[in-house]
Amino acid sequence: MMNKNIFGIGLFVYCSSLFAQTQIADLMLEMNQEFSYFGRVVEGSGDINGDGYDDLMVCSWKYDYLNFNTGAAFIYYGSPTGINDVPDDTLSNNITDSNFG
């Protein structure tokens, strides 16, 4: 049986600092599409929205956003309490098979 996680339907997020590291995930981000390759590329994007907290970008290059395999990059904004489990912003296009992200 093939492990579906390689096709990107979930991603564990660990929040830590130099002084406090954990082996237990703080958050699991999930995708509603199998074979979207959600989480194959994850980028600590710095502070995208300028609020003083680091943000996270998760790419899903086979995501069917507006058309088949358009791909998408999901932006999760950081906050004093961490990262939300729902993306705050989504970047994509409407070009079939463009594999954006």
Image: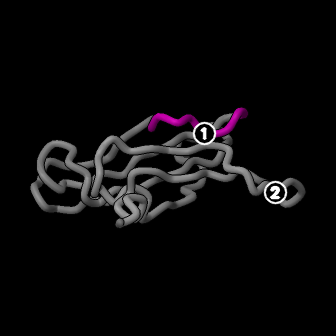
Residue sitting farthest toward the right: 19
Image: magenta residue range: 80-87
Name the side, left or right, on which 36 lies relative to 39. Answer: left
Q: Earlier in the sequence, mark 1 or mark 2?
A: 2
The local crowd at label 1, few if under 14, some if 14 to 19, many if 20 or more residues have their Cα within 10 Å, is many
Residue sitting farthest toward the front: 1
- At 49% from the left and 61% from the top, the residue drawn is 42
The x and y percentages for residue 14 are: 67, 53
Would residue 51 be counted in the magenta stretch?
Answer: no
Dominant secondary structure (helix, strand or loop) of the stretch shown in magenta: loop
Would residue 81 be counted in the magenta stretch?
Answer: yes
Q: Secondary structure at mark 2?
A: loop
Residue 50 is tagged as none
63 or 6, nearer to the observer: 6
Mark 2 lies on residue: 21
Name the side, left or right, on which 72 lies relative to 46. Answer: left
Name the side, left or right, on which 81 lies relative to 101. Answer: right
